[in-house]
Image (tube, rainbow, N blue to C red):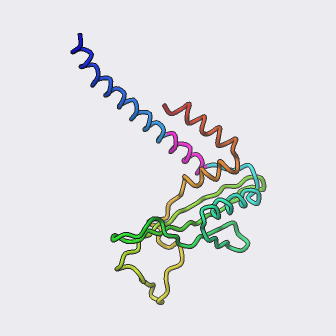
Amino acid sequence: MMSSKRSLLPLSLLVLAIASLATGCAASRREAYVQEKASQYVYRKPIADVWPHVQTLLKEKELELREAPGAYEISTDWQMAGAPSSLGTAYARYLVRGKQPTAATCSVQIFKQNRVETAQSQGSRTNQGQENPGFNDSTNLQRDMEMEWELLQRVDPEAAKSLRAEAETNIK
């Protein structure tokens, strides 16, 4: 009788491990789902009501903002992302664009650009001898859906709560 209990222990641990893994995978899929939905979200508010939340979100992340006059567009300065290492130093910056298709609706897109500066690339210059200040390297300019989800939770908490419930219901 004792040996049958011992043989069930490894099986029980295996089942527990698989269940834990499945739960973790479902949580990741739910998080991806809400972030994807947030990236497509259209706010039922004018951009002028949403834009202060955008500014606050970026300022709370201690990012230096440069706003385009007369437009709902912000770019940030490059900021070190992590500690320097022998492989190079990682930097990131953001580009945020607000769009207002109607007077009562808007959307916000947040893009993140990453770069790694190595000893060889430090001081690289364009043909004019100046650093390249624009978002010209589109190969690593990607939507930051995590930050867009964070913005949605601030601006429209009820919609965010509804999306979270939808994810919980649809993704098991």
Identity of the residue drawn at 48% across and 65% down: 81
Horizontal and vertical percent for residue 119?
35, 78
31 or 45, which is in the foreground?
Answer: 31
7 or 142, which is in the foreground?
Answer: 7
Q: How many labels does the image show?
A: 0
Residue furthest bottom in the image: 128
Horizontal and vertical percent for residue 7?
24, 19
Residue furthest left in the image: 3
Q: Is the magenta stretch mostly helix, strand or loop?
A: helix
Residue furthest top in the image: 1
Verify whether residue 31 appears in magenta: yes
Horizontal and vertical percent for residue 36?
54, 47
Horizontal and vertical percent for residue 54?
67, 60
Q: Give the range drawn in magenta.
A: 30-40
56 or 108, which is in the foreground?
Answer: 56
Q: In which quadrant of the rendered image does the N terminus lie?
A: top left
Identity of the residue drawn at 27% across and 25% down: 10
Above-or-below relation of 25 to 50: above
The quarter of the displayed image where residue 69 is located: bottom right
Above-or-below relation of 162 to 66: above
Identity of the residue drawn at 75% across and 55% down: 102
Identity of the residue drawn at 70% across and 51% down: 155
Above-or-below relation of 75 to 15: below
30 left or right, relative to 57: left
95 or 84, which is in the foreground?
Answer: 84
Residue furthest right in the image: 103
The quarter of the displayed image where residue 51 is located: bottom right
Verify whether residue 83 appears in magenta: no
